[in-house]
Image: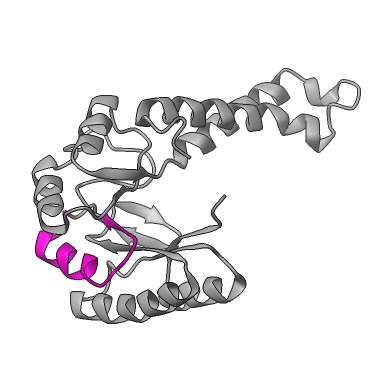
Amino acid sequence: VALHLDHGSFEGAKACINAGFSSIMFDGSHYPIAENIAKTTQLVHTCDVLGLSLEAEVGSIGGEEDGVIGAGECADPDECKAIADLGVTMLAAGIGNIHGKYPENWAGLSFETLAAVKEKVGDMPLVLHGGTGIPADMIKKAISLGVAKINVNTECQLAFQAATREYIEAGKDLQGKGFDPRKLLAPGFEAIKATVKEKMELFGSIGKA
């Protein structure tokens, strides 16, 4: 089990390193590339010494995540190579993906960008953020082009919300000790488990831990 910081600031990354996290994501995508490189370099040295994994980002991911708002940019492959060459463990490259729900007019993933990034960074594992709502065929194609880690959060939250709402609207929280948090939250917990299992099957990650 990895304790992972997602979309951390530079100071947040350092704080989580000190707190004992095993995996750090520093999101320097909103900085000019030179500053992103400088800050990532410092974290690479620290994580290398401590044996931690470090994820970096190039090209802002669309939507909002932990207060960082991006428009869904496509990363510059040369900038991706510059960050990858620093010695990070994995790289999140923007390819038109968006956090949260995708709008109806979403243009889809830019596989041209993904292929160009992969050509530049070689064996570096690539990360796809905003996995909720991306069609299965796009997910599979992205994996075939080098994506090794996919973040899915909103879909798990929505599954939890729907199951919890159903439990309460059915009045089960008013029956016996249905108000017990362990019973009240159980349907949502199981719904997240089912969603994760479904994603593991789609991603082809079963049996690879």
Residue at left offset 46%, top offset 25%: 198
What residue is shown at x 19% (from left), y 80% (from top)?
A: 34
Whether the magenta-drawn stretch holds residue 102 is answered as: no
**Which residue is depicted at the point 21% across and 53% down?**
123
Residue 183 image-quadrant placement = top right
Image quarter for residue 167? top right
Q: Is residue 209 above or below residue 17?
A: above
Q: Considering depth in this image, is 39 or 61 the residue closer to the camera? A: 39
Magenta span includes 77: yes
Give the residues drawn in magenta, as a range.
Answer: 74-92
Drawn side of residue 84 relative to residue 156, left or right: left
Name the one closer to the observer, 85 or 129: 85
Q: Position of residue 40 (x, y in %)?
A: 32, 75
Please provide percent x and percent y for residue 50. 49, 74
How far across and down, in percent of the image, does residue 152 sit? Answer: 42, 40
Residue in view at x 19 percent, y 48 percent: 95
Above or below, 125 against 85 in this view is above
Which x, y percent locates residue 207? 47, 31
